[in-house]
Image (cartoon, rainbow, N blue to C red):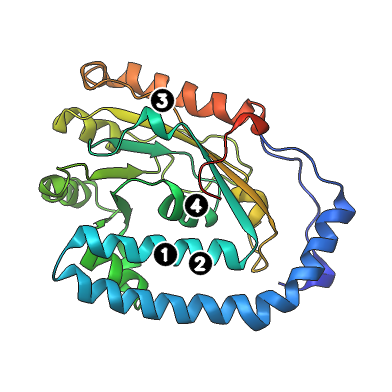
Amino acid sequence: MDLDRLPPREPSPPGERESPPERDDLRRWLVAPWTLLVFLPLVVVTTVFWGILAIALAALSKKLAFHCGVVWARCLCWASFVRVRVAGRERAPAGTSYVFLANHQGDYDILALYGFLGRQFRWVMKQELRKVPFLGWGCAAIGHIFVDRSNPRAAIASLDAAKPRLAGGVSVLFFPEGTRSPDGRLLPFKKGGFQMARQLGLPIVPVTISGSLRALPKGSIFPRPGTIRIEIHEPIPAAEVQDLDRAMATARARIEAGLTAEPDRARSGGG
């Protein structure tokens, strides 16, 4: 992206404080040389290294291989001066399987959740990512779930085939909006994650992500130093998930409440 032709500044999404425009511009200029000379090459090197290691370790243990992604994501956050703070981990204790449902603001959602959620999970991602060298190969080896979003029947079949992987504290994570929000506000939810939770008898854990849209604005390759906040909300019990409409409304309300809440109340949990 040409730094001399930056797009007009948009209003802050819900849950984010405004920063002075001159401060954001200064941050972009300051990190641009670092991004080009250090960060982007590091993305390539770490993706290749941890992708190959994940493939190798997956032959022994997919749970062990999952941690390759954790280290990869943390390295990239630290290298781009993005801190991640997590609140509410105690609401979803380790050792139990859940269906995590998170809002989707941008690419840094993936790094923040993978690196700092602190729970073993399998991601539901679009089929096209399987073909990405090293990244997609490593995800496939770990057991992440690829779905063909253009073919609902095939997508359902992929989710059904993945059910045996979700046991012993291994959860599944969906972006129920299905795509990134252009302005940070919630898009309509799709039913796939809710239906899977009902079929498996698992509780749903709504998760709010704030700050990732500002960390990497759409169309930019220059991450901005800053903080991403993850808030894990009270789970929706499996018994209540049987009523899909009610579960969808509850999950949406909790995620949206996190977007509009004062961000400083999030407690530090892993930045």
Disc 4 versus disc 1: nearer the observer: 1
Type of residue at label 2?
Cys
Can you tell which of label 2 and label 3 is closer to the viewer?
A: 2
The residue that mark 2 highlights is 75
Q: Secondary structure at mark 1?
A: helix
- 23 up-or-down from 138: above or below: above
Quadrant holding the N terminus = bottom right
- Which numbered mark, 4 or 3, is in the foreground of this view? 4
For the residues labelled 1 and 2, the Cα–Cα distance comes to 6 Å
Q: Residue at x 64, y 69 (%)?
A: 221
**Is residue 150 or residue 17 the one in the foreground?**
17
In the structure shown, which secondary structural element does the residue marked by tag 4 occupy?
helix
Q: Residue flagged by tag 4: what amino acid is it?
A: Ala
- Distance CA(mark 2)–CA(mark 4): 11 Å
Tell me which numbered mark, 1 or 3, is placed earlier along the sequence: 1
Q: Which residue is mark 3?
A: 251
Q: Are marks 1 and 2 in contact (CB under 8 Å)?
A: yes
State the residue position of label 4: 112
Secondary structure at badge 2 equals helix
Query: Label 2, label 3: how many angstroms apart (C-alpha)?
Result: 31 Å
For the residues labelled 4 and 1, the Cα–Cα distance comes to: 11 Å
